[in-house]
Amino acid sequence: MLTFVLVHGAWHDGSAWETVIKHLQAQGHQAFAPTIAGHGKSVDKNVNHAQCTQSIVDSIVGKDLTDIVLLGHSFAGTIIAKVAEAIPDRIRRLIFLDAFVLNDGESLRDSLPPHYQALFDSLARESDDRTMVMPFELWREALLNDADLELARSSYARLSPEPYQPWIDKLDLKQFYSLPIPKSYLYCTEDNVLPQGEQWGWHPRMSNRLGLFRLVQMPGSHEVMFSNPVGLAEKIIVAGRD
């Protein structure tokens, strides 16, 4: 039996993993899905990256979880890297699910193509609280391109505005890159949130920064936890095994 801690991406909260967790539990595993500080509906969005990270550390330590497989989706790749620095002895393996793997000293914004930088800068600037509301067209065509319109609409309704500060905080990752924790990269082959290929894409651009890592692939979009949660759970098990 494995113990999984699944950390959601931007615009989400821990409830995004509900169906995935049910399948993991049906296969005999434990699974937890904490919500990152500043994420979810009707919460204070005034958070920085360090506070986001600390909220996940506090959740793991508060439950006294050890020997965990820690997964981060998308934005949460930046979170689990810093969590690993804080509590390396509690982590059995890291899984990056179509997730950002930043170079030392970078922010998430630094790793985005210029057209996304301009879009998210504009969304944050136009809001009252420096958050970004996901445009439905982007969600439908880029993030959840393997689902019908009904699923796109129902899952979109679950999103909430995303704090921008954690995206622009520069991260010191020297310690992360010195850790011996085993790593996996789980890549969904129809994910075109980032332009596919070596210049901007998830794999091989992000994945190869991990050095030695296990590559697991599956068909699906960036938001495969909605479009194929059972298939995703099965691949998470493969990515997390010894």
Image (cartoon, rainbow, N blue to C red):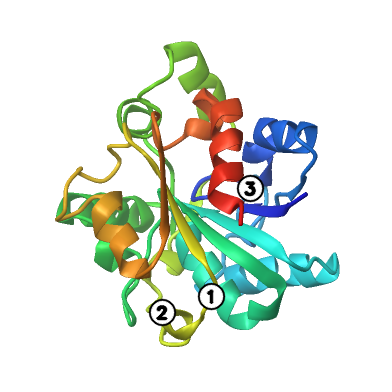
Disc 1 vs disc 2: which is toward the camera? 1
Along the viewing direction, whichever of 38 and 144 lies nearer the viewer? 144
Along the viewing direction, whichever of 20 and 143 lies nearer the viewer? 20
**Residue 121 falls left or right of residue 22:** left
Three-letter residue code for mark 2: Leu
Three-letter residue code for mark 3: Gly
Q: Which residue is mark 3?
A: 40
Q: Which mark is residue 171?
A: 2
Q: Which mark is residue 82?
A: 1
Secondary-structure class at tag 3: loop
Residue closest to the far front:
242
Secondary-structure class at tag 1: helix
Residue 237 at least partly seen: yes
The mark nearer the N terminus, 2 or 3, is: 3
Disc 2 vs disc 3: which is toward the camera? 2
Snapshot quadrant of residue 139? top left
Q: CA distance from mark 1 to mark 3?
A: 21 Å
**Residue at (68% x, 68% y) in the render:** 55
Q: CA distance from mark 1 to mark 2?
A: 9 Å
Q: CA distance from mark 2 to mark 3?
A: 23 Å
**Residue 25 falls left or right of residue 226:** right
Snapshot quadrant of residue 91? bottom right
Q: Is residue 225 above or below residue 1?
A: above
